[in-house]
Amino acid sequence: MVHDYQILINIVVHGDIWPAHEVLLEEHRLREDDFIGLASQSPIVPRGRERLFGKALYAGFDRDFTVSMHLLAPQIEHMVRFHLKNAGVKTTNLDIDGIENENGLSTLMGLPEVEKVFGKDLSFEIRALFCDALGPNLRNELAHGLLNDDSFQSIHAIYVWWIGLRLVFNTFWNAARKAESDKDAEENNDN
């Protein structure tokens, strides 16, 4: 599945994401503050991480996938941990000295509750991109300094930026539409 997913990423980046990105750059001059504002209003972004997400998304928009990846990878890991904790999932372990440590992304993504919190598709994408040794294994490769300059211009780096943008925007959009729908329903009940 991971191998087939790699093929799909290649097709999606070259056929959809990159052409759409080019159009956005030509037709809109978005600023870093636009992305920070979007992240601030997105329920998937943990409080106190809005600037980091916004800066990462802006960097990718501005074709600086090196900065985007360096910011997004740990923020996505934190986002996973944050939402698992909020769902009551234990995200820590005790070492042999009795010291509590946070589990890394690979361990978190192996928890049975992950699909309940993030859904089957997103869980698979995060595992395949960031944790799977048969995939790009981006979390570990980045954390251990194993990525070179070309790695940050790869289809995987572009796709990680796209996943970050998609997560932040879609959750923002869905929350805004729900709020609007709730407001309309409330107004109709008042009449």
Image (tube, rainbow, N blue to C red):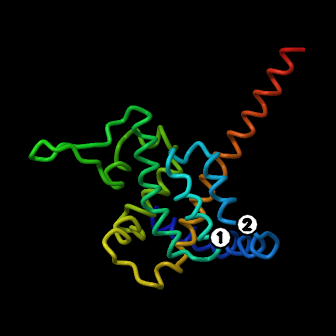
Q: Give the x, y percent position of residue 151.
A: 46, 80
Residue shown at 79%/69% (left/top)? 28
Q: Residues within 10 Å of mark 2 (few under 14, many from 20)?
A: few
Q: Amino acid at mark 2?
A: Leu
Label 1, label 2: how many angstroms apart (C-alpha)?
8 Å
Q: Position of residue 23 (x, y in %)?
A: 78, 73
- Mark 1 against mark 2, which lies toward the viewer? 2
Q: Nearer the viewer, residue 58 or 118?
A: 58
Helix, strand or loop at label 2? It is loop
Q: 89 or 33: which is nearer to us? A: 33
First of labels 1, 2 by sequence position: 2
In the displayed structure, would residue 48 be above or below residue 166?
Answer: above
* Tag 1 near tag 2, CB within 8 Å: yes
Which of the pair 120/53 is nearer the observer? 53
> Measured along the vertical axis of the image, is residue 17 above or below residue 105?
below
Q: Which residue is mark 2?
A: 30
**In percent of the image, x 34 and y 67: which residue is there?**
140
Residue at 65% of width from left, 76% of height from top?
Answer: 14
Name the side, left or right, on which 74 lies relative to 18: left
Amino acid type, mark 1:
Phe
Residue at the spot 55% in from the left edge and 52% down from the top edge: 50
Pinpoint residue 15: horizontal percent, then vertical percent: 69, 73
Q: Is disc 1 placed on a helix, strand or loop?
A: helix
Dividing the image into 4 quarters, which one contains the C terminus?
top right
Number of residues whose C-alpha sits closer than 10 Å to that of mark 1, classed few (under 14), some (14–19) or many (20 or more): many
**Dot 1 corresponds to which residue?**
61
